Image (cartoon, coloured by chain):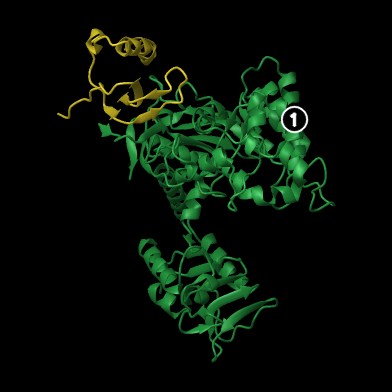
Amino acid sequence: MIDLEGKLAIPGFIDAHAHFTSIGQAKMRLDLTKVRNWDEIVAMVKEAVEKAQLGEWILGRGWHQEKWDKTPEPNVDGLPFHLSLSKVSPDNPVLLTHASGHSSFANAKAMDLAGITNKTPDPEGGEIVRDAKGNPIGVFRETAQGLLRRALSTSLEKRTPEQRKAERRKAVELAIEECLSKGITSVHDAGSSFETIDLFKEFAQEEKLGLRLYVMIRVGNELLKQRLSDYRIIGLGNNHLTVRSIKRAIDGALGAHGAWLLEPYSDLRSSVGLNTTPIDDLRETADIAITNEFQLCVHAIGDRGNRETLNIFEEAFKAHPEKKDLRWRIEHAQHLHPNDIPRFGELRVVASMQGIHCTSDGPWVIKRLGEKRAEEGAYVWQKLMKSGAIICNGTDAPVEDVDPIPCFYATVTRRLKDGTVFYPDQRMSREEALRSYTLNGAYAAFQEDILGSLTPGKLADITILSKDIMSVPEEEILETEVLYTIVGGKILYEK
Amino acid sequence: MPKKFLSKIFPVILSIALIGLVFSCAPKKEPADLVLTNGKIVTVDEANPEAEALAVRGDTIEAAKRSSLISEKKPR
């Protein structure tokens, strides 16, 4: 018996687009973005060493000496010496990348493996930072980082297949733990190899997945043709693992001017972005998918990318009128030409979108697209829903944090960090947002008969929250904590 | 008893309970394995959008009701 004490219970969150193993891999690197000083970094490394295998590399990213509340002593240009780090990690090489990516910090063991001594010259375009006596302090700038990276690659190549597998298992375990702690009961994994799917199968068969995974296969057409039929998996391990979809990408991302547009970028008139997979390849994938009764999920961000994808889908549907209820998906569907918006509803194509992308990308969407295009077609949730489209929600983790609460907040507010609201008429109501994160996710995975709502007869996937996100003032949504995550009636996370 | 049958008869049982008839009119049943009670339950189910108590049997939702009269299996 759980006494909710007036708290809110909802269907478990379904993150319909996340990179599952990458969530775990990100957890295997130390996140140094929030540390207050060098001493904290040393303490974090010390803790990591205690959990690591002997000789395993300790990796981290995101430190920035300008953000620290005190300058380390001794220092060179405000940068610490490796001695304190080498002391807590004598046998494990440590490599900590700066927030900018333009320098790295190493301990004695890492420098040792890289063959670095006080006689090693600075490589061209780089600098080994040294003390007054000429000894490396542990900081490597620009190309000098390559000396350490090569040592890292050499070590990684030496891993046995068993070690590699143990690391991949560890990543999956961490991803499971992370998602459950944030109230997520199902994840749609946005693209994995057959090898990774084999690993998920092991977890499912051992009943160790905990949450439910809906996996998109991401391999080339040749491999698909050879092995696709072996990988149709429905509800393995008491409905914990399902594989019946294929992932592809037609373009890149808007931030890097990679999204494929119909008209040039407003801030880069020479470019319309990139088509990353040739149309003919995608047509072939569509044919493989439809003849094998697999769902096709195509990453499309720009309006051209979306139009071409809809065309490919429509062509495949027309060629196979006997195939019904296909629910093919466009992942992101971020920027659409007004003429293409109603096509989602007409073709029954699911728009698999990420509420949080709207507010994190919002600040530069208008720069890239200009006001007119941004208003007409960027994250047009209401326009899509009014034309009959089903929208599911997610985070694209680890691109964004997998936490559904900030994403739910972004979906209902579209409020950017500076307080402005990105085209408020396209916000979802709280009911629409919750549906996008639960029942619509289930629909996008052909699982609405067993998941997505708290309906008698469905699986008992339930998330209990500290605040009533359906009625509290907007700003309080962000303070919401997950109290329980229940999957199939079992409490798998409890705060 | 097959689950499909359960899911079919449950709305009937629930509506009986909801219109105020005594719950024990329904066929005698084992108590649930997990019960959530005394909260706000948003179901995302149009037929029954909100509930106050929820009963789970095995891995499946057995009932979502407006009152907190669902009983849980006692530990033995």
State which quadrant residue A371 falls in.
Answer: top right
Q: Residue furthest front?
A: A473
Between A455 and A24, which is closer to the camera in this rendering? A455
| Residue pictured at 60% horizontal, 53% vertical | A418
Q: Is residue B59 above or below residue A208?
A: above
Q: Quick one: quadrant of the N terminus of chain B?
A: top left
Task: Measuring from the top left, give residue A91's x and y in whole percent.
Answer: 41, 72
State which quadrant residue A192 falls in.
Answer: top right
- Decide if residue A9 is on the left or right side of residue A22: left
Task: Count neighbours of disc 1 (C-alpha within 10 A) and say few if under 14, some if 14 to 19, many if 20 or more.
Answer: some
Chain label for disc 1: A
Q: Is residue A242 above or below residue A21?
A: above
Q: Residue furthest left?
A: B76
Between A318 and A52, which is closer to the camera in this rendering? A318
Between A6 and A113, which is closer to the camera in this rendering? A6
Does residue A38 appear anywhere in the picture?
A: yes
The chain letter of the yellow chain reads: B
* Residue underneath mark 1: A340
Q: Residue furthest right?
A: A270
| Residue pictured at 42% horizontal, 36% vertical | A204
- For the image, the number of numbered tags is 1
- Decide if residue A165 is on the left or right side of residue A344: left
Task: Measuring from the top left, give residue A19's x and y in whole percent.
Answer: 54, 44
Say what amino acid the circle numbered 1 marks.
Answer: Asp
Q: Is residue A384 above or below residue A41?
A: above
- Decide if residue A150 is on the left or right side of residue A367: left
| Residue pictured at 64% horizontal, 31% vertical | A382
Task: Measuring from the top left, give residue A139's x and y in whole percent.
Answer: 55, 76
State which quadrant residue A225 falls in.
Answer: top right
Between A167 and A58, which is closer to the camera in this rendering? A58
The chain letter of the green chain reads: A
Does residue B58 appear anywhere in the picture?
A: no
